[in-house]
Image (tube, helix red, strand yellow):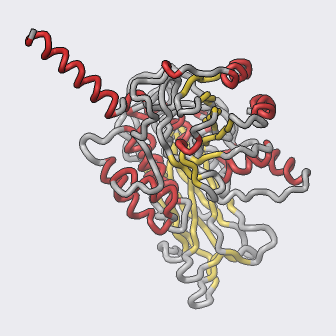
Amino acid sequence: MPVWHEALKAARKRDDFVMIGITQEQHPDRCRLYAQWQGIDWPILWDPFNLTDSYAVPIFLGVDEIGFVREQFHARKGQEAFAAFLDTMYPANQVPPAGVPPTLQAQTKEAAQGRGSALARMLWGGHEVYDEAIEAFTARAVEGDATARDSFELGVALRLRYDSLAFRPADFQDSLASWTQALTMQPRQYIWRRRIQQWGPVLDKPYPFYGWVAEARKAIEDRGEKLHPVAVGLTSSELARKSNEMPPVGVRGVNPDPEGKIEADPGALVHIESAAALHTGIAGGRARIPAGTARIHVALRPDVKRDVHYSNEAGPVQVWVEVPEEWRIDRNLFTVAGPPNTESSSDVRRFDFEVVPPLGPPPVGVKLKAFALYYVCDGEDGLCVYRRQDFEIPIPLPALGGPPDTDEGR
Amino acid sequence: MKKLMLPLMALALSATSTAGVQDESAVGFAKGRFLPDLELPTIDGERTVRLSSLRGKKLLLVQFASW
């Protein structure tokens, strides 16, 4: 991209030329930060639903004055061909028979029916209309003739809702399940595969997805600019590097309440949810990894209706996770602190870790056993308590299948 | 003569229909196709751009991701 950015400076001075970007990311604000860092000032459109139907990125297309795609340029060496494209007068006889740029497959903001309407609601409607749209996506995805795209789009919509004020605790897990279903049907769709890998295990990561963010923030601040905000916090999974190193076998850490002596909170004060992003090899591909290899994402949300908040002075949240014998896990004890220098807070505490089952039959129906310990104060009665909450982490495996895949996309 | 006219008429009708109904297979984000008339928001959410609004000039369209 930076090479093109330089090459385009001259072209952009021309009156007969325009350029535009389309990003294939779930979160537009992250791309906005990237554009700020790189000094990109041409418009970038947000296409989380992959409506362009591209299988990989980057793609550079040269489009003529009537909307006909004349060239696809090489991502790294296409600048010369691009210069030739700019200076070429395309004869009218190369125009396809219809002669007029078609409007078929149009997806517009004003779409009023069916899938088009659901997409428009998700892209422009705001969280207030997400439920209606997701109802429509869900109806499509469960029909007998549902396509891979139906499942992918449902996954995108669910994840958008999860990141919004309309979130439902199961949205993240359901989005991952929908994407995995879609990828199982189209294993060479690398845009869809990346959507899972973003939150998936390091064994499956092609690169650190948002590893550039820290460098970008520093560079922007050094320039004296105000940073564009990142609305949805980055998880450690999205920063993690690819690795072939397996987590260890055996218990790591000391169980903070082995006998269950700490008084239980049956879920009234803090709500806990989890999502398992499976290795995409399960949907088809070259990787041969144990089915069930996953990165697990856990979130602990204080009950806002009761104005529950963590007592940060008393200590951080601790979570103990147990796995079946012979399974591998990063560690068993996780400590999740609140914002620094705060006495109390009602933030959502998140952490993620990886598990690898032993080779063998898929571990269908496995649920990891876990418990959380936290100091919280109840806004209703003013009481501050130390509580334990036991919970289970399901690792939902899809129906195995999908053709072998040999491509290596970006 | 009548036997020859019928296939010719069918061919003519078929050609008319192709020109009028626009070939959906010729639409796509690939060389040799018309760009679909897609409308999307910008990443800052402040604008909406419909690809057909960019006609009239040569366009470089870049699909990418920050990762």
Question: Of all residues shown, which one is farthest toward the left?
Answer: B2
Residue A371 as seen in the image, left or right of residue B6 = right
Q: Quadrant of the N terminus of chain A?
A: top right
Residue B47: name its quadrant.
bottom right
Residue A405 coordinates in the image, percent (x, y): 46, 22
Residue A407 as seen in the image, left or right of residue A404 = right
Residue A396 coordinates in the image, percent (x, y): 41, 46
Q: Quadrant of the C terminus of chain A?
A: top right
| Position above or below: A294 against A322 | above
Q: Nearer the viewer, residue A199 or A136?
A: A136
Residue positioned 56% across, 37% down in the render: A194
| Position above or below: A140 against A194 | below
Q: Nearer the viewer, residue A223 or A273?
A: A223
Residue A84 coordinates in the image, percent (x, y): 69, 19
Residue positioned 26% across, 46% down in the render: A143
Residue A239: name its quadrant.
top right
| Position above or below: A393 against A295 | below
Q: Nearer the viewer, residue A214 or A56?
A: A56
Q: Nearer the viewer, residue A330 or A301?
A: A301
Residue A318 as seen in the image, left or right of residue A34 = left
Whether residue A328 appears in this view of the structure is: no
Residue positioned 49% across, 76% down in the render: A268
| Position above or below: A194 against A35 | above
Whether residue B26 appears in this view of the structure is: yes
Residue positioned 65% across, 20% down in the render: A88
